[in-house]
Amino acid sequence: MAPVLRLTNITKCFGKLVANDGISLTLARGEVLALLGENGAGKSTLMSILFGHYVADEGHIEVFGQPLPPGQPRAALAAGIGMVHQHFTLADNLTVLDNVLLGTEPLWQPFSRRSSARAKLLAVAQQFGLPVNADARVGGLSVGERQRVEILKALYRGARILILDEPTAVLTPQESEALFDTLAQMVAQGLSIIFISHKLGEVLRVSHRVAVLRQGKLVAEAPAQGTTQGQLAQWMVGHAIEAPARRPARVVGAAVCSLHNVSTTPTGRDRLQNVSLTLHAGEIVAIAGVSGNGQVALADVLCGVRAATAGQATLRGAPLQARPAWLVNQGVARIPEDRHAVGVVGDLPVWENAVSERLRSHWFAHPWFKAFWVKRRAARQHAQHVAETFDVRGGGLDTPARSLSGGNMQKLILGRALLPPEDEAGHSATAPQLIVAHQPTWGLDIGAVMFVQQQLINARDGGAAVLLISDDLDEVLALGDRVAVMHDGQLSEARPADTWTREAVGLAMAGAMH
């Protein structure tokens, strides 16, 4: 059969950067094609060209045998191409039906044809095995149910080719299993799917064929059956990759930080309710949970940007103050969830971002700061040390941080947090004693993930207490010496990782805390 989608010699350049270099791909009816690659490999650019957001410099696209007009998102939708983004684009205050209808009716239509729309939505939901309450408000739905609505939005519009971007990133294991069952039904009915994910085990389970991009070029195509995760990783980065060895903490030391019945003022759905937790030196405590269940509040309290309204938080026995500069001075390092909005100041150069959090710290003021003036040479030397030690690529010290890829931006943040600067005599300051790592590998390719995870293990082995907050259950179970689960602002007991099963963690993530 003729392919439903054909991309031929797609090339796209941004100045001297070749984002896509002569890429040709096909997609068959009822096929799941996994699209893999490192951050910056060209996946997003290619999908943006397919969806009409970018215009290719060379090449053309055919959908169901017909040329796809370039640079026209409306034409892509009309041709039957739908996309479900990793971050949902739903209005919480509207019903499921209203969200599905948004953008499907002309502005000059005098009234909404809700009755026929409801019938069509329910028919599509039944056809593809996606049960939904059309009158439920989206704000009250679980994450898995919201994703179901996003898929229904695309199918309601007649999508026959569906692009799924990191579809399991925020799902519990049980929700992921339900999604895989849904995808199987969709494929059986003739839908074609492009599956983008960094979870290689899921890729091999779900897809029929894999295509790998590296540095803008298509470097490998292979059937999923018979291909290993190791092969995929090697194709993605160009060399073999070994995961950090799972080994227990060597010596667990004294308590560094303790929370006792800590609560916070609710901010939307994000809050803490009577949370108790103790973090010890030389140990990684990993927190699992579906995003939005209090993880942000927990990280904010430990980083000093949010105050507890009840309970007690201590750092080495002293009251923990809601002052970020004080916490940096006390040896608390943070790796924030949102690297773009919170982790760096995008318009500032790399060197300024590398030293920014230390300027107000009494520990490190003398190497870079004197009499209200920044010592640029010393600051730049430290930034260069960070870039070299943590392999930050993508430009020099004067490159704006926003131009870095996600992986390199995360390496810059890691280096800033973990690498203590030296004074003028060459003496290093004390390494961080508490590291709050919130989604440290979110959205990173396999090579960057392994690098970040190894740095956290090294910090633990160096005597730091590490709090790892992650939506990735594999990461939680692989790195955590103790594991706890957050749900609706409450935290389960932190137990040794080997006492948890994936099923038990998944149930706790869904609310079965006991």
Image (cartoon, rainbow, N blue to C red):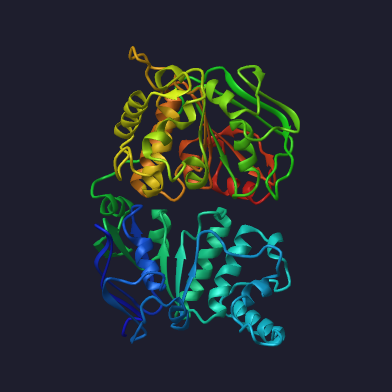
The percent position of residue 504, horizontal first and vertical second, equals 60, 46
Q: Nearer the viewer, residue 88 or 381?
A: 381
Q: Can residue 113 be seen in this view?
A: yes
The percent position of residue 153, horizontal first and vertical second, equals 57, 74
Which residue corresponds to the image point at 38% horizontal and 60% vertical from the top-left?
204
Q: Which quadrant of the rendered structure holds the C terminus? A: top right
The percent position of residue 61, horizontal first and vertical second, equals 32, 78
* Location of residue 351 by image quarter: top left
Q: Nearer the viewer, residue 271 or 479?
A: 271
Q: Which quadrant of the rendered structure holds the N terminus? A: bottom left
The percent position of residue 46, horizontal first and vertical second, equals 34, 66
Is residue 397 toward the left or the right of residue 435 in the image? Answer: left
Which residue corresponds to the image point at 36% horizontal and 52% vertical from the top-left?
39
Q: Nearer the viewer, residue 391 or 184?
A: 391
* Location of residue 121 by image quarter: bottom right
Is residue 507 toward the left or the right of residue 450 in the image? Answer: right
Q: Is residue 364 visible?
A: no
| 315 to 481, vertically: above or below | above
Which residue corresponds to the image point at 57% horizontal and 49% vertical from the top-left?
503
| 77 to 455, vertically: above or below | below
Q: Which of 403 and 439 is in front in this view?
A: 403
| 333 to 89, vertically: above or below | above
